[in-house]
Amino acid sequence: MQATHSLDVERRRRLFNMKSVLLLLGIFVSSEATFTWWDCVPATTTHPYVTFTKMDISPSPAVLPGNITASVQATVHHNFGRDVKMVVKMDKKLLGAWTKVPCAHNVGSCNYDNPCEFLSAFQTSGTCPPQLEAHGLPCTCPFNPENINLPPSVFQAKLNTAWEWIATGEFRVEAEMIHGHDIVGCFHVEMDIKRVGGSGFIFG
């Protein structure tokens, strides 16, 4: 009788352990970070320079180094170039709390007085990335009013050792375009990045 009771206890223990494992797996899968975004131009901005209507990045989580598929739909309403500054706010989730990522090597929570300078290499070479050229999209300042429609396009995410400290984890980024004292463009992105060896990333 004692042996039968011990067997029943052992069966219940194993069943409990199995249910616990399945529950943990379910929590892990359901909490897997997905790519989310929204246009964050304030309602008080009466004449935005840019509005975003669609944005997507896959896979999610993004695995680096590797290929990332991106698509964007937006409308440029107003000519702009060096007169627009950019303020980027970047946070990384640490121990369940969002923590500000400081600006280092032009990555993180940075203020860019002339974001156009990052596009000067394309202007010097006279060519845009093929993913943009294939759809007649500009990549250098100034930008003129037009509709931007980048269908799902594959970009190679390359590694940069200077960005090792930011290469993996759950992130949220908000980028504001500033003209004078007004926010004339803004998008907010939240995504998860997983690193496979190496460190840091740039798009190419």
Image (tube, rainbow, N blue to C red):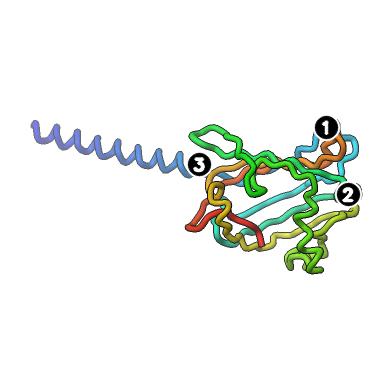
Q: Secondary structure at mark 3?
A: helix
Q: Which residue is mark 2?
A: 80
User: What's the distance in space between the residues labelled 2 and 1, CA to CA?
Assistant: 20 Å
Image quadrant in which the N terminus is located:
top left
The number of numbered badges drawn on the structure is 3
Callout 3, which amino acid?
Ser
Q: In the drawing, does residue 68 fall left or right of residue 164?
A: right
* Mark 3 / mark 1, whichever is N-terminal: 3
Question: Crowding at label 2, few (<14), some or many (≥20) Cα neighbours within 10 Å?
Answer: some
Report the residue at 54% width, 51% height from top: 164
Report the residue at 57% width, 34% height from top: 98
* Mark 2 / mark 1, whichever is N-terminal: 1
Q: Which residue is mark 3?
A: 30
Checking the image for residue 89, the label placed there is none
Q: Which residue is mark 1?
A: 43
Report the residue at 19% width, 37% height from top: 10
Question: Crowding at label 3, few (<14), some or many (≥20) Cα neighbours within 10 Å?
Answer: few
Question: Crowding at label 1, few (<14), some or many (≥20) Cα neighbours within 10 Å?
Answer: few
